Amino acid sequence: MSLSQQRRFPRRRTSVGASRDFVVDVLTEWQLTPLIDDIKLCVSELATNALLHGVPPAREFAVRLHATEDLVRLEVRDSGGGRPAIQHAEDDCCSGRGLFLVGELAAEFGIDHHIVGKTVWLTFKRPAAPFVP
């Protein structure tokens, strides 16, 4: 069994909140609520990065969730250039920790570069189904 949903978002600040709402709605529909907090935090970071560094003016970015029996994969794709990289920010820096944090929350983390743009993806282990005697 596999499930998949995707939504596109315009290049606006409000799209970060809308992308969080999207993943909450999908994970709730799929009855994967134990993953909501981690994935909501991660999509917020990835959507913000897409807006700040990846989405050219008048373009959109896409958020996709894909679930299999074992994993949930979160993807954020944009059409911009740039090469995301995990940084090791100094203690007194106010930014630069986002990809490090999402990489720590996820089971796997990666970046697929395309001819136009890139996809930043994370996977999360699905919680075990509750035991019913």
Image (spheres, rainbow, N blue to C red):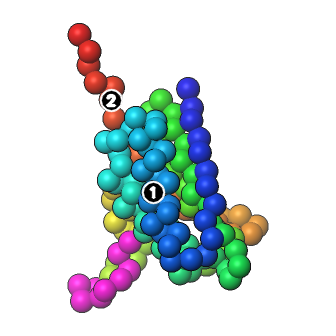
Question: Is residue 91 shown in magenta?
Answer: yes
Q: What residue is at 35 percent from the left and 83 percent from the top?
A: 95
| Sequence-earlier tag: 1 or 2 | 1
Compared with residue 35, is residue 43 higher up or lower down, i.e. above or below?
A: below
> What are the residue bounds of the magenta stretch?
90-98
Question: How far is mark 1 from mark 2, CA to CA?
Answer: 24 Å
Q: Can residue 14 be seen in this view?
A: yes
Q: Residue lying furthest right in this view? A: 115
Relative horizontal placement of residue 54, taking residue 85 as reference (left or right): right
| Between 67 and 92, the one nearer to me in the picture | 67
For label 2, the crowd category at 10 Å Cα-Cα, with few meaning under 14, some 14 to 19 and many 20 or more, is few
Considering the image in quadrants, where does the C terminus appear?
top left
**Is 122 on the left-hand or right-hand side of 10?**
left
Q: Mark 2 points at which residue?
A: 128
* Figure disc tally: 2
Q: Residues within 10 Å of mark 1 (few under 14, many from 20)?
A: some
Quarter of the figure with the N terminus:
top right
Instruction: Tell me what residue is drawn at x 45 percent, y 57 percent.
Output: 21
Residue 38 at x, y = what percent?
A: 34, 54
Predominant secondary structure in magenta?
loop
Q: Which of marks 1 and 2 is in front?
A: 1
Q: In this figure, which residue is indicated by the disc labeled 1?
A: 21
